[in-house]
Amino acid sequence: MVAYLLAYAVAVRNQDGGARGAHAKASEAANARRGSCDFEDLLSDLPQVFVTRRLPGDALARLSERAQLTVWEGTGAPEPSDLLNGAQDADGLLCLLTDRVDAAFLERCPRLRVISSCSVGVDHIDLVAATARGIPIGHTPGVLAQTTADFSFALLLAAARHVVAADRFVREGGWTWGHRWDPEGFLGVDVYGATLGVVGLGEVGRALATRARGFGMRVLGWSRRRREIEGVERVEFDALIERSDFVTLHVALTPETRGLIDRATVLRMRSGAVLVNASRGGIVDEAAVAASLRSGHLAAAGFDVFRDEPIAPDNPLLAAPNIVLTPHIGSASVSTRARMADLAVENLLAGLDGRPLPHCANGS
């Protein structure tokens, strides 16, 4: 790491592109060697931070000015052993929702003073164990609601109108002269004038309701907290399930919401309804949804999240018809992911400095 930072510093100093003599180069090399000792002394005073993935934007560059960074450079998420190796001597950990941080992990990372997750949800972290060790947990709420609502509505439209299947049909050569226009081909479900049931009226749910009203939909809403939203008819959960043509899910995964959409609930949905889940996979009985798609009880579905991620090869949703599946990309826009990285770094720096985290998931 020291060698990399020294090389970077020398490269910046030499960007003038001018020719230098041998004496000047030798002098610079001697200065660089002296500077290396000073730089190593400086780094030794900085906290050590392990970052589990490269992040969009310049947040990590700013963090590198305040900490010694080790950034996982693998092609995917680090394996549990790699995560432990990177974090066990670190003062701070900047992780993602793919990184499992449990009590056993924390026990083997005695120097950790702060963990900052570049995510809104923190169900991948054992908050009880972290709190018992006095480790604040940062997260990144309040920046991805609009982006996630955009994507949730995109899933709704794509599922309702068979956009993905139609795209595949064209690419695979199915659009032939004999099938240039089929009056019964890719018949979908109308959005305009339909009833949308929004489960969870937090930031994302409210943002989605706004989009739905723009499409001429009637919007029903349910939330565990009493929320009155303009243009949203608040109803009980059972009424929402039974009256909605489309149901979208926007609740956190908690003991109360785990399995909220179970087999009995799926069967109570309107025949021909469409289900969209861009919140957390554990909320839905995936086997029940797959069975209802196969039977035709549900017309379509769109899922961005799954009980196990990545999705298991034997997940029944993979073989179900009329479902759009995406790899947990609800917040995947350039500006939103960069802002999430900014917040994650702000949380991490606050914890390293002994200050309250701007966004603490286990604070009072």
Image (cartoon, grey):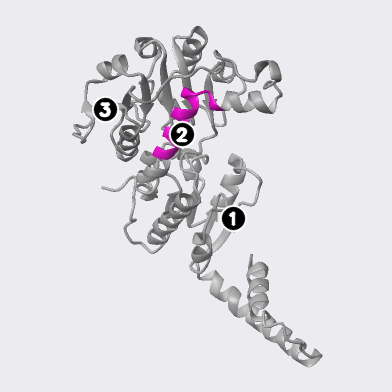
Q: Amino acid at mark 3?
A: Gly
User: Residue 199: which disc?
Assistant: none
Seen in the picture, residue 303 relative to 42 is either above or below; the reply is: above
Is residue 273 among what the camera can see? yes
Report how far apart the C-alphas of labels 1 and 3 lie in the structure.
Answer: 42 Å
Q: Nearer the viewer, mark 2 or mark 1?
A: 2
Camera-nearest residue between 101 and 241: 241
Mark 3 highlights which residue?
221
Camera-nearest residue between 212 and 93: 212
Few, some or many residues within 10 Å of mark 1 (<14, 14–19, 20+):
some
Give yes or no for residue 169 being in the magenta stretch: no
Q: Position of residue 100 (x, y in %)?
A: 50, 39
User: Residue 154: which disc?
Assistant: 2
Q: SS class of the residue under badge 1?
A: strand
Q: Is residue 223 left or right of residue 41?
A: left
Q: Residue furthest top?
A: 295
Q: Nearer the viewer, mark 1 or mark 3?
A: 3
Residue drawn at x 26%, y 20% is 237
User: Residue 71: which disc?
Assistant: 1
Few, some or many residues within 10 Å of mark 3 (<14, 14–19, 20+):
many
Q: SS class of the residue under badge 2?
A: helix
Q: Position of residue 263 (x, y in %)?
A: 40, 12
Seen in the picture, residue 99 relative to 24 is either above or below; the reply is: above
Seen in the picture, residue 13 relative to 342 is either above or below; the reply is: below
Is residue 111 among what the camera can see? no
The part of the chain drawn in magenta is 149-163
Q: Position of residue 210 (x, y in %)?
A: 31, 37
Q: SS class of the residue under badge 3?
A: strand
Q: Quadrant of the N terminus?
A: bottom right
Residue drawn at x 41%, y 55% is 343
Dominant secondary structure, magenta = helix
